């Protein structure tokens, strides 16, 4: 039985609420609404319940998000990849980008709520599906999908808030006060849960459904982010050995509806549009081309020239002929560059529906570059209601994460590591590692190579902030962006770094106020 293309959310709102509470007054049967006692009966009910779990991924604070919300594109804007320059002061995450946020900040609360909404829905399904009349194998599969989705949310939560409440079953009203668990315990439990359920999942499934490869990739991600190198290596190796995934041949055409079903996509948040109220607004913009989320010059400069060398050393680099400013951008600096640059960023010299961009837009961009990934210039009318899926996990991430885990574990075969990196670079038309960096790279040399490749390959896919946090590079990123602001005289916001507290988001103040057992992090008291 297939999930419908349109995720089902509102249909199950009453069911999810009812099954999350046990007080008598909530158990009265309605003559018109679905209730907990009449729902979880058959396979159709179970499928709807599972659809509700997936529906939570469409939140504008998870894997959707227009210019003022904070989906994956905007999460990268909290780092050295981008910024909220155009909408100073009222975009979600603006104060986190600046380093001026608090426990009462908009995004701090909204991201928490979005993650826990998915967790709640998954817990409801896991709690009730054993009562459904369907095969044991299908029950195990649906449970495994919910466990994997829940694990994905705990990755998001532990990478931002660190220690959080670890909920694995629905809470009643009397259980609403719940303490936080330490991150290490959550990670250990999530890893064990994923290892237990992966074999219950199919190798292939309807697009957007959790497969064995997706669950293993989620396992690899949480292990990698928490320096569990053996677990990460094992998980990613198993994904590769499934022989289910491969890199799509054209990076520039990958982020389109025409190719969202290709074998590179390990897991995606599904969207349908336009006109169905199921579309995403990742590509939303106002008037001028892509006027919403800006990239940074620091990111654009990170893309190497086509000879595989950085712009600071490559003879192919044509920039530096102008001072470069909002009103006088140096168009030549974007010649002879890694093709992923113009597939990711809309830069001076590119065309928008036949109009050449000379200022980053019809009016000057605050940084002269906009985010291009997931934007379709040929369908601007539907940019607020696009049917383009968001790719939560791509196979290129698997390859680069596998390479990183091997290097950090130590005792690696350098040829194996380089082959993984080369597979990603070659798809972008970039030369092989051996032809540029040679064969004698040290562990740190490989580490820096992988980190660079992750940045340019996965930019604006919601992973850069997690990478900056786990590599402890935030202070360096803040300094570079502030220096860039001065160098180019752009209208960037000034960013601040207040020390270790910047790596851990505060628990939302509303949660602390309403939960007597939930204690604020020491760094934020």
Image: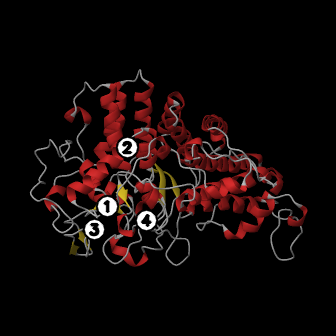
Q: Earlier in the sequence, mark 4 or mark 1?
A: 4
382 horizontally vs 295: left or right: right
Q: Earlier in the sequence, mark 4 or mark 3?
A: 4
Find the distance from the CA under tag 1 to the CA under tag 2: 17 Å
Label 3 belongs to which residue? 365
Residue occupying the far front of the picture: 525
Q: Are marks 1 and 2 in contact (CB under 8 Å)?
A: no
Point 63% across, 34% down: residue:
188
Q: Earlier in the sequence, mark 3 or mark 1?
A: 3
Q: Nearer the viewer, mark 2 or mark 4?
A: 2
SS at badge 1: loop
500 horizontally vs 507: left or right: left
SS at badge 2: helix
SS at badge 4: helix
Q: Are marks 4 and 3 in contact (CB under 8 Å)?
A: no
Point 77% across, 46% down: residue:
136
Label 4 belongs to which residue? 257
Q: Quadrant of residue 453?
A: top left
Checking the image for residue 492, the label placed there is 1
Vertically, is 389 above or below 148?
below
Find the distance from the CA under tag 3 to the CA under tag 2: 25 Å
Q: Nearer the viewer, mark 4 or mark 1?
A: 1
Find the distance from the CA under tag 3 to the CA under tag 1: 10 Å
Label 2 belongs to which residue? 475
Point 86% across, 62% down: residue:
37
42 horizontally vs 88: left or right: right
Q: How many marks?
A: 4
Q: Quadrant of residue 309?
A: top left
């Amino acid at each position: 039985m297939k999930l419908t293309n349109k995720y089902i959310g509102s249909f199950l709102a009453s069911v999810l609420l009812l099954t999350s509470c046990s007080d008598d007054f909530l158990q009265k049967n309605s003559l018109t609404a679905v209730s907990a006692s009449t729902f979880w009966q058959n396979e159709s009910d179970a499928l709807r319940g599972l659809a509700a779990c997936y529906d939570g991924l469409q939140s504008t604070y998870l894997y959707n998000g227009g210019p003022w919300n904070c989906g994956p594109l905007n999460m990268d804007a909290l780092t050295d990849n981008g910024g909220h320059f155009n909408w100073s002061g009222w975009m979600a995450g603006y104060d986190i980008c600046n380093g001026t946020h608090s426990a009462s900040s908009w995004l701090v609360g909204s991201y928490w709520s979005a993650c826990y909404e998915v967790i709640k829905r998954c817990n409801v399904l896991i709690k009730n599906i054993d009562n459904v009349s369907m095969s044991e194998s299908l029950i195990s599969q649906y449970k495994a999908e919910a466990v994997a989705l829940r694990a994905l949310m705990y990755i998001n939560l532990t990478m931002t808030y660190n220690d959080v409440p670890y909920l694995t079953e629905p809470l009643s009203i009397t259980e609403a006060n719940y303490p936080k668990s330490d991150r290490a315990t959550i990670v250990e439990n999530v890893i064990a849960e994923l290892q237990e359920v992966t074999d219950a999942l199919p190798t292939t499934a309807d697009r957007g459904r959790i497969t064995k490869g997706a669950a293993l990739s989620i396992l690899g991600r949480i292990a990698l982010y928490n320096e569990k190198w053996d677990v990460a290596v094992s998980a990613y190796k198993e994904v590769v050995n499934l022989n289910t995934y491969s890199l799509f041949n054209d990076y520039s055409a990958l982020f389109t509806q025409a190719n969202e079903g290709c074998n590179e996509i390990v897991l995606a948040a599904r969207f349908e549009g336009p006109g169905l109220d199921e579309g995403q607004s990742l590509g939303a913009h106002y008037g001028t081309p892509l006027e919403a989320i800006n990239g940074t010059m620091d990111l654009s400069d990170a893309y190497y020239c086509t000879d595989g060398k950085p712009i600071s050393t490559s003879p192919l680099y044509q920039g530096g002929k102008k001072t470069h400013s909002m009103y006088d951008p140096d168009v030549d600096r974007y010649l002879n560059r890694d093709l992923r640059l113009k597939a990711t960023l809309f830069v001076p010299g590119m065309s928008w529906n036949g109009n050449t961009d000379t200022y980053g837009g019809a009016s000057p961009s605050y940084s002269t570059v906009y985010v291009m990934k997931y934007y379709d210039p040929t369908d601007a009318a539907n940019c607020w209601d696009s049917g383009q899926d968001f790719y939560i996990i791509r196979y290129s991430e698997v390859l680069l994460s596998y390479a990183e885990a091997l290097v950090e574990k130590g005792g690696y075969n350098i040829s194996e590591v380089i082959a993984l990196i080369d597979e990603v670079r070659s798809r972008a038309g970039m030369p092989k590692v051996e032809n540029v960096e040679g064969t004698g790279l040290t562990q740190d040399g490989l580490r820096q190579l992988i980190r660079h490749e992750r940045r340019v390959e996965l930019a604006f896919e919601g992973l850069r902030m997690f990478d900056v946090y786990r590599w402890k590079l935030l202070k360096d990123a803040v300094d570079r962006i502030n220096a860039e602001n001065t160098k180019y005289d752009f209208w960037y916001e000034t960013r601040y770094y207040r020390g270790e507290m910047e790596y851990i988001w505060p628990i939302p103040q509303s949660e602390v106020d309403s939960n007597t057992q939930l204690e604020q992090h020491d760094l934020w008291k």
